[in-house]
Image (cartoon, rainbow, N blue to C red):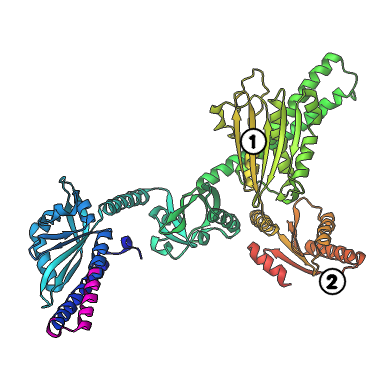
Amino acid sequence: MKDYEKKPEQLISELQAAKARIDDLQKVLSAVAFGGAAGGMSPVIRRYQRAQEALRDSEESYRALVETLPDAVVMTDLEGNVMMANVQAAAMHGADSSEELLGKNILELVAPRPKERGLDDIEKACRSGILRGLEYEWVTKTGSSLIVEASICALHGVDLKPRALMVVARDITEARRTDSALRESEERFRILTESSLAGVYIASQGRFNYVNPAFAQIFGYEQKELIHKMGPLDLVYPDDRPLMERQLALRAAGPSDAAHYLVRGVRKNGQIIYWEILSRLIDYKDTKALVGTSLDVTERKKAEELKDEFVITVSHELRAPLAIIKEGISLLTEGILGKVGRKQQHVLIIARDNINRLARTIDNLLDISRIEAGRTNLKKTRVDMAVLARACAAAFRTRLREKGVRLSVKCPPGAVVIYVDSDRINQVFTNLLDNALKFTDKGRIQIELADSRGSITCRVRDTGYGILKSDLGRIFDKFQQANQPKAGSAKGTGLGLSIIKGIIEAHGGKISVESRLGKGSCFSFILPKYSSKEVMREYLAGGLKDAMRKGVNLSLLLLSLDIRAGRHLKMMEEVIARHVRRDDDAFFRDGADFFVVMKGQGRRDAALLSTRLAQALRAYCLRYKLRSRGVLAGCAVFPDDGQHYADLINKAKSL
């Protein structure tokens, strides 16, 4: 332990030990000197000389110890008059040297309130030997004061009577100020959180360290029932646990932005609520913890669902007559119903284009309603993002040539594989490329992909007009359009960027934009990498939620092989893909285990598909002469075999 880490009483013990060694040496010297004077023997004189040298060394060590201590050390007589002070005592007083303190009374330096307390402490130290943990006000040369922690020790002579006093003092002014500031901060935090209408919690190691009254009220518990006994995962609805587990894992992995997400929670009485969470990782009591705010948004969610149902209903009601009108116009423009003049043809084409525009607007409204309602059903599969990006770029070649704009795709070598909904990410690329081309008259557009350990970053850059700085903060809001500096720029509904933001966030990713006016823009989105097991659990949890809402079955098939050859397992995926044809069905591979999720299908349909898949896999093994003990098949059906995705997986594995 370093000197500055020691407490005053530890330093006093060391000083006492050093002083005791000096006293012992003085006794030896006295005895040796007396013996040498009486006997005059040479060995005695040598012993005397060695004792003198040892005494000098010990005194020098004692002085060095006192002078190098980080604390003020003052030695006084029994009246409190200073006989010795180290440089730290002088510095604490503001004196130029230790000599300035000599002759002063200790009560002039250390000013207890009242002064009589100091005299009492001196008397107690003389009686008991040492007093520890005293707190005094230390007065400096300029009249200012410090708060010091002190210990007083009585130094005894050979007759065991007190001969002097030693005071060791440490400046704790800053520590006291910090403690006071901390207490004030804690009091402000307590007042703020205790009176807050939003729920506030601090959690670490899977348990709540603190919850405020509002948080406990949201879930119908007493505070004492939650603190140190439960954690966030204990309050979340089972099917939403994967989302919260993923968010908790992301926060625990290291510094990151605050997480803002919505899950369903379960109150003490079993009632299901919608729980909106904003959380961030902090340092808390020498460990990492999550601090979060929580809101019960159940009523708001119900209102949003009513609004979304209204939008969806109206949109569907509009689409049917639009389709009929569009078909009638097509019959006219194609001359099927008779010859149409040039002017009539022109008018009909304008009408058709506006109908198409209106249809796209309706589709956008439906998309945004589904996204806001959390009904974006993603069908995630293994996708090579490099292949997808190049395919999207190829679709724009003609328009690019017509406008004279160059397009390039920059990808890392090899495949850039990730689990995403291919159609939805294609929609994101298409929208970004369409915007880039719309607002770029010359120069180039570039798609960039960057593959990192836990995510894939995609960028779409252009050298177009750029976006005003004032518009960047609202560019992803609904019905918002940037004020393009070029007059006559094409206008849309203002929903495109809001939709792609919803698609990216539904994948657990983030999207952002950077732009300089006149230099161009760069839209970037980051997609996290998930294992096939994580994707399957997410898809299965979402499927169960829909099945509960609609009151239908959901089946999970498991086909397991004892083959480890990666090439053949990859080809077996293609075999299964050819048999899983329904849009609502999806399959996933975890090692040599193949899982198929069948939405809206019962045990009979699941058994038929399981038989076909097992036969197809056995045929593949025979064709390539693969050694295998066969295909093990299992099936679990909601709600008969379980209500939670983990129950269905375990049931399928047990068969």
Numbered label attached to residue 134: none
Of residues 142 and 96, which is closer to you in this image?
A: 96
- Residue 366 as seen in the image, left or right of residue 304: right
Counting from the top left corner in percent of width and height, residue 575 is at 85, 58
Amino acid type for the residue under numbered disc 2: Ser
- Residue 25 as seen in the image, left or right of residue 478: left
The quadrant holding residue 308 is top right
Residue topped by disc 1: 523
Residue topped by disc 2: 628
Query: Which of the marked residues, 1 or 2, is nearer the chain's N terminus?
Result: 1
| Residue 358 in view | no
Q: Quadrant of the N terminus?
A: bottom left
The magenta-colored residue range is: 37-56
Counting from the top left corner in percent of width and height, residue 335 is at 89, 23
Counting from the top left corner in percent of width and height, residue 457 is at 66, 44
Q: Residue furthest bottom?
A: 39
Q: Is residue 28 above or below residue 435?
A: below
Specify few, some or many for label 2: CA neighbours under 10 Å numbering under 14, 14-19, or 20 or more: few
- Residue 195 as seen in the image, left or right of residue 128: right
Q: Residue at x 41, y 64 (%)?
A: 225
Q: Secondary structure at mark 1?
A: strand
Is 381 a magenta residue? Answer: no
Q: Is residue 615 above or below residue 587?
A: below
Q: Residue at x 13, y 77 (%)?
A: 158
Counting from the top left corner in percent of width and height, residue 520 is at 64, 28
- Residue 492 as seen in the image, left or right of residue 225: right
Q: Quadrant of the C terminus?
A: bottom right
Asked if disc 1 and disc 2 are in contact, CB closer than 8 Å, the reply is no
Amino acid type for the residue under numbered disc 1: Phe
